Image (tube, rainbow, N blue to C red):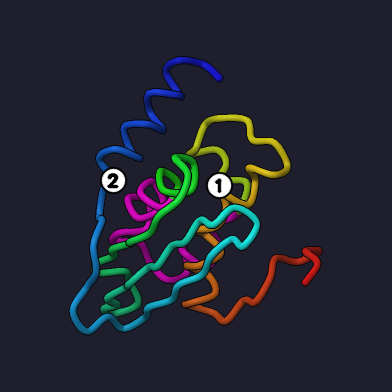
Amino acid sequence: MDDFYREFILDHYKRPRNFGTLEDPDVTHEEDNPLCGDRIRIDLKLREGHVADVRFTGQGCAISQAAASLLTEKIKGASLERVRGFSKEEMLEILGVPLSPIRLKCGLLALKVLKTGLYGLQRWPGEEG
């Protein structure tokens, strides 16, 4: 892994942006990755079709927690239409590091939590159980 990206991920892990919970969120959802123990909860406040505020809490590896921090930065203030269109490929692009198949679930957990909370997505298309 390139040193710049390693430091980028560690910075978001050690100093996560938008960490915490919201009082009376409009949407809250939490999931874990049972294979590695990562857990993420995302709270959203919605106003006029936009993400007015977002917070996350969680525990786990640097990749999963940095991904949650990065994702909250990207969606804060975004339209729900934009959030709905946010793809796995975009999530991996903002992480900026290549991930092994096992680490892929770490990098995508926050996005799955977000989409499940907002739209009821239970699993990614093509994903087994």
User: Which tag, 2 or 1, sits closer to the chain's start?
Assistant: 2
Q: Residue furthest left?
A: 23
Spatial CA distance of label 2 from label 1 is 15 Å
Q: Classify residue 85 by image quadrant.
A: bottom right
Q: 1 above or below 73?
A: above
Quarter holding the N terminus? top right
Q: 123 above or below 17?
A: below
Q: Which class describes the residues within 10 Å of circle 2: few (<14), some (14-19), or many (20+)?
A: many
Quarter holding the C terminus? bottom right
Is 86 contained in the magenta span?
yes
Q: 61 above or below 56?
A: above
Q: Give the residue drawn at x 69%, y 36%.
A: 100
Front position in the image: 51 or 54 = 54
Q: Classify residue 101 by image quadrant.
A: top right
Front position in the image: 47 or 109 = 109
Q: To which residue does mark 2 refer?
A: 16
Could you tell me if the residues under marks 2 and 1 are in contact, i.e. CB atoms within 8 Å?
no
Q: To which residue does mark 1 refer?
A: 107
Q: Give the residue drawn at x 40%, y 67%.
A: 41
Q: Main secondary structure of the magenta part?
A: helix
Q: x, y percentage for residue 127?
A: 77, 64
For the residue marked with disc 2, what is the amino acid? Pro
Element class at badge 1: helix
Magenta stretch bounds: 68-87
Front position in the image: 75 or 1 = 1
Element class at badge 2: loop
For the residue marked with disc 1, what is the amino acid? Gly
Question: Which of the numbered marks, if any, corresponds to residue 25?
Answer: none
